[in-house]
Image (cartoon, grey):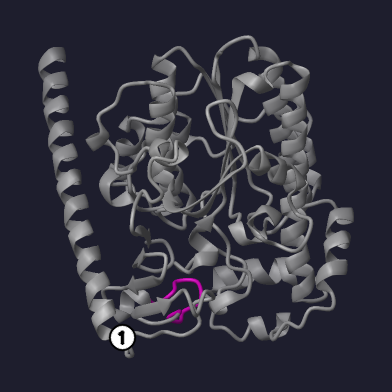
Amino acid sequence: MKNNIIIIVIDALRARNLECYGYNKPTSPNLNNLAENGVLFENAFSTTNATDPSLISMFTGKYPMSSGIRNHGERMTETEKRMAMNLVTLPKILNRYGYVTLGVNWLGRWHKSGYHFYGIDYPWHYRLIKLISSFYHLKLLEIKYTTETAINLLRKYYNKKFFLYIHFWGTHTPYSAPESYVNLFYRYHKGAEIDINIENIFKIPFNSKWRTYLYNWLKELPNIAYVLSQYDAAIAFIDSQIGKIYQTLCDLGILDDTNIIVTADHGESLIEHGIYFDHHGLYDESIHVPLIFSGPLFPKKKRVSSLVQHVDIVPTLLDLLKIPFKKSFFDGFSLLPILEDNISEIRHFIISEETYTENKIAIRTKKWKYIFSPSKKSAICKYCNIIHGGIEELYNLDYDPEERYNLIEVYPLKAKELKEILSAWLEKMKEKRGKLKLIEKIRRIKRQQFFG
């Protein structure tokens, strides 16, 4: 058995909008099938709410605090960019063990390191289409070409042992799906009672860039229900593309040799907490992500309630593939003991941080969440110019799963307890980062000595 690996990342997909996670609208028939024939992790969380550091966590098994890659996009420092290129990642490891490594995504930069192929095969006339088409239409074409590229790569390499990473962006603003899909979900959402309308959104003191972005997208839309319909439609459309990829595996006769992992880099806030159509904030809608394992390496019809994170994916795969590794190298844990029913819990808390729009960090257990910002200035959202929730926040998730009632003044001892655990964890991460810096320095000196 070749044990091919496919990782599908659906950008900005919150777990709660999938049927297999309890949603009451038909967004995900193909993902439901994967979950039914595999393992669904009910409590999976991203390490951050921004794409660049989240993908690095996913493919290195390291928290941003440990890898040193905490920023995103244009805010990444030159030091972070150099460090990102040198990180040990899953495609680099699998490359070494005989896998053909394939990545289907436009993001590029350091993310393409370690792949034999990385990119999207746009047709020759795509540049012309870009000149005359709207951004919304281009995103639909991007989804189409992402699927076609992935299928063509499967047809080309199906007789080899491969690792294939596919990244869909349609669930990132502005949510993109064919009009027929949007109309379908608008029938579900149209009658919903929604406390805010589009006009009221613009009373928030957004920064000018974010205000312009939202206005250009929302100005022609009838109401908030339509935006929610666009998001669900985008999920359903991407789900249909996953169905095509699944059918290709069947047609090529390699389904039984292929393991599929589906997740998201982070979630999305739609209207919750005064955060509209973005993923800033460390509330569950922005960090609770789907995680589904399906294939010959995994059990079937299994739901796991343990808290897990993206950093657990790499050590789990290496463990299952019997590729040797030092457990201390990763911040995550192999989930094999859970998959084999040897234990029921792999960790007692998860950590997630953000640095792009706010500077905050959260510790979450199954019952409690504590969110901390070091100062009022750090807590101010750079998009909304307000503080979402507070400088310190505490939520009892048993009674308040929507995180509406900040209990920081009611349970100060619980907040203190979680803050101490968080502080100890931060010290541990700083220690690991310090050791990695020392190793990097020694390697750099050796290279300089070798090359004169």
Q: Position of residue 423 (x, y in %)?
A: 20, 64
Residue 387 located within the stretch drawn in magenta: yes
Whether residue 367 appears in this view of the structure is yes
Q: Quadrant of residue 127?
A: top right
* Furthest-front residue in this view: 342
Q: Is residue 48 left or right of residue 419?
A: right
Q: Position of residue 93 (x, y in %)?
A: 38, 23
Residue 314 located within the stretch drawn in magenta: no
Q: Is residue 410 left or right of residue 10?
A: left
Q: Which residue type carries mark 1?
A: Tyr
- Seen in the picture, residue 432 relative to 447 is either above or below; the reply is below
Graded by Cα atoms within 10 Å as few (under 14), some (14 to 19) or many (20 or more), the crowding at tag 1 reads few
Q: Position of residue 288 (x, y in %)?
A: 51, 59
Quarter of the image with the C terminus in it: top left
- The residue depicted at 23 percent of the width and 73 percent of the height is 417
Dominant SS of magenta comes to loop
* Furthest-bottom residue in this view: 410
- Seen in the picture, residue 316 relative to 154 is either above or below; the reply is below
* Number of numbered discs on residues: 1
Q: Position of residue 34 (x, y in %)?
A: 67, 39
State which region is magenta.
380-388
- The residue depicted at 49 percent of the width and 23 percent of the height is 115
Q: Which residue is mark 1?
A: 411
Q: Camera-side residue: 331 or 255? A: 255
* Furthest-top residue in this view: 159
Whether residue 135 appears in this view of the structure is no
- The residue depicted at 55 percent of the width and 18 percent of the height is 162
